[in-house]
Amino acid sequence: MKLLFKQRMFSWFDSYDIFNENGETVYTVKGQLSWGHLLKIYDISGCEIGTVKEKVFTLLPKFEIYSGTDYLGCIQKEFPLFKPRFNIDYNGWRVEGNWTGWDYSVVDSYGDTVASVSKELFNWTDTYTIDVKDPRDALSAVMLVLAIDAEKCTQNS
């Protein structure tokens, strides 16, 4: 399942639309006023289905992930030596990136790729292509991309 993750232009808060291969919106993401990033994910009917919430006052960036109101776990940036790495404490997943940090893979505990993420260059806003192996993992993959994009935003400010 391929998803196109595109940040909206002219938004006061982080907001994104996520489209499927047919160009149909499957998720909408709206940033909320908060200390740190707070991103709410909605399905096509407008129901809140997920949240990415930045924990503030941590040594390295850390984001809590929720499915509805259920806490799933967190993703935290690790000290990088040669390439960006994130620690994920749920699903048995890990994130491995290349030296640019724009392209990375989400890998399960067996080493199989769950999702591949590529940043599209030469766009006015942040735009990513997410190739998810199993459509049931799409929401979790989107929330990881949101957390990593928010981390990069924090790093650049």
Image: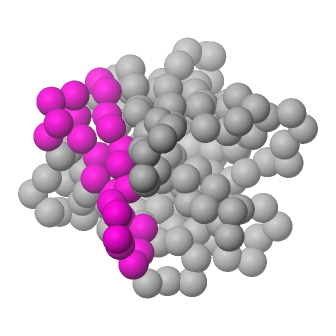
Quadrant in the picture for the C terminus? bottom right
Quadrant in the picture for the N terminus? top left
* Above or below: residue 108 compared with residue 88: above
Residue at point 76% right, 70% down? 58
**Image quadrant assignment for residue 47:** bottom left
Please state which of residues 81 and 23 is positioned toward the viewer in this rendering: 23
Please say whether residue 50 is visible from this viewpoint.
Answer: no
Q: Which residues are magenta?
A: 1-24
Please state which of residues 32 and 89 is positioned toward the viewer in this rendering: 32
Q: Position of residue 34 (x, y in %)?
A: 49, 83
Residue farthest right in this picture = 81
Q: Position of residue 69 (x, y in %)?
A: 36, 66
Left or right of 44 on screen, residue 18: right
**Image quadrant assignment for residue 39:** bottom left
Please say whether residue 127 is visible from this viewpoint.
Answer: yes
Residue at point 70% right, 29% down? 98
